[in-house]
Structure formats: structure tokens, C-alpha cells
Image (spheres, rainbow, N blue to C red):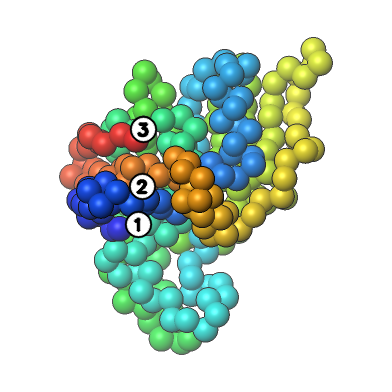
Amino acid sequence: MTTTYTEAADLIHRATRKNVLLCASPGQLLDPGHARAKEIIASGSLGRVQFARGQGSHPGHENVDTYGIDPTWYYRPGGGPVMDVAVYPLHSLTGLIGPVRRVTALSGVANPNRTYRGHPIDIQMDDSTLMLLDFGSNVFAEVNGTYCQVARNTPQVEIYLTEGVLQIGGWARPGVPLEIHGAHDGVKGWLRPDRLQPRMKHTVADLAHFADCVADGLSPIHSAAHAAHVIEVIEAGYRAARSGQVQEVSSSF
């Protein structure tokens, strides 16, 4: 949406003043696995959320197919793995649990010796950031945002409740959109819902939902206010890492 909360808030103000609809990607809650998980949390059938984890890492764009596009801009100010990849689980966790109130983090350059097509990359942005989120009422979540993940076999989001567990595969584990641990027919164990629709590529789903909102006067699930909040969380995380102090988050959605 933007790279700063101030810019995001200004866009929202302008859109409101002009009476136009403003949405922002990614629309994580449009994914069927996320939507079902949100219903389960809201129902209270697995109790209340206690803590969560978010997977937001990547091998580094110099190590994957980038369609021949020079990926070195990812390592410049305004880029980095948090804005690029961790933004997804940050949208997921805030969409499922609620707004973040405080953030702390550790951040730095884990691999300064990166190359693209035999040429060194000028690393100007941290490639490894770990964030700890406080949602209030002692509900915490950890989120990783790195370009240090050579491979993965874990879900994008894990939510641990008093009576069960929700694991959302997302793009990190697309073959398993949702796994639920709880009591099923009186027996505790893991269940994979078999009637979830296949996950649509998020950019397509986001645009389709935006068109529906314009046509039918709906309130967007992937709201600009939600995205602005996530941007403030990211900014607060980097401030926390630089200062060594927990940072407050003032926005909501």
C-alpha cells in the first residue's frame, strides 16, 4: 500500500474525502482456510487464543526464478523481507486475532555475501527480522521475516487456543489449507476439512473482491485501514530492533 503509516493514513483520508473505495492487498482473509479459521475462533468452539506463530520467510529473490528481473532492489531501503514476505502472516494474524498493541523485535543482516548473476548485491536492508507481537490480555505471537529460509515444510500460520490448534497452510504449505486439532466426534486429533475451495492466487482474489465491493456496495474484507495498521506494526518492529525498546502501536482497524 505504502512504505510508511503516515503515507497510508494520508491515502485513507484522501479516499474518504473524495468518497471513493480504497482497498489494499493482501486479502489473506479471502482465503478459504483463513475464513474457516476465523469462524472457528469467533465461535469459541476451541476456546480462546493463547499464542500464535507466523511464517514470513523466503530463500532470497536472487535464489529463485524472478522472470529475469533484477531482484537487488529488495535489499534497498523500503524493501526487505518484512515488507515483502512477513506482511502476509502479519495480515493473517491481525485479521484472525485483532490489532497489535505493542511490538518488539531483533533485526540485522545474517548473510552479507549475496550475489546475483555473479555480481555482489549491495545489502542496505536487514535480511533477517524476528518480531514479537502483543495483542493485549497476554496474547502474544512471533513472526519471522527473513531471506534466510532455504526450504520449508511448515504452515504459514499457527494459532494455539485453550482447547485446540489451528494451522493454516497459506502459500507456505498450499497442499494443506487448514488443519484443526481438537475434539472430533468425541475423539481428540487432527482434522483436515475436505470441503474448502482451492486457494485462488491472492492477487486475483483481491481484485475480484474489490470489484464485488464496487459493484454491490460492500465493505471490503481487505480494508485499507487493516493494511495501514500492518504497516505501522512493521515500522514499530524496526524501531524496536534499533532502539532495544518495546514500541507502542496506536492504530486499529
Return the residue at label 3: 99
Left or right position of 190 against 19: right
Q: Residue furthest front?
A: 216
**Are circles 2 and 1 on residues that touch, CB within 8 Å?**
yes
Q: Earlier in the sequence, mark 2 or mark 1?
A: 1
Give the distance between the C-alpha atoms of the residues marked 3 and 1, in whole angstroms.
18 Å
Tell me the number on the disc at residue 159.
Answer: none
Tell me which corner region of the image, top left, top right, bottom left or bottom right, holds residue 45: top right
- What's under tag 3, amino acid-wise? Pro
Name which residue lies at 46% across and 43% down.
217
Q: Nearer the viewer, residue 216 or 15?
A: 216
Return the residue at label 2: 224
Return the residue at label 1: 1
Residue 27 appears at what percent x and percent y?
50, 48
Name which residue lies at 25% across and 52% down.
18
Q: Nearer the viewer, residue 249 or 129?
A: 249
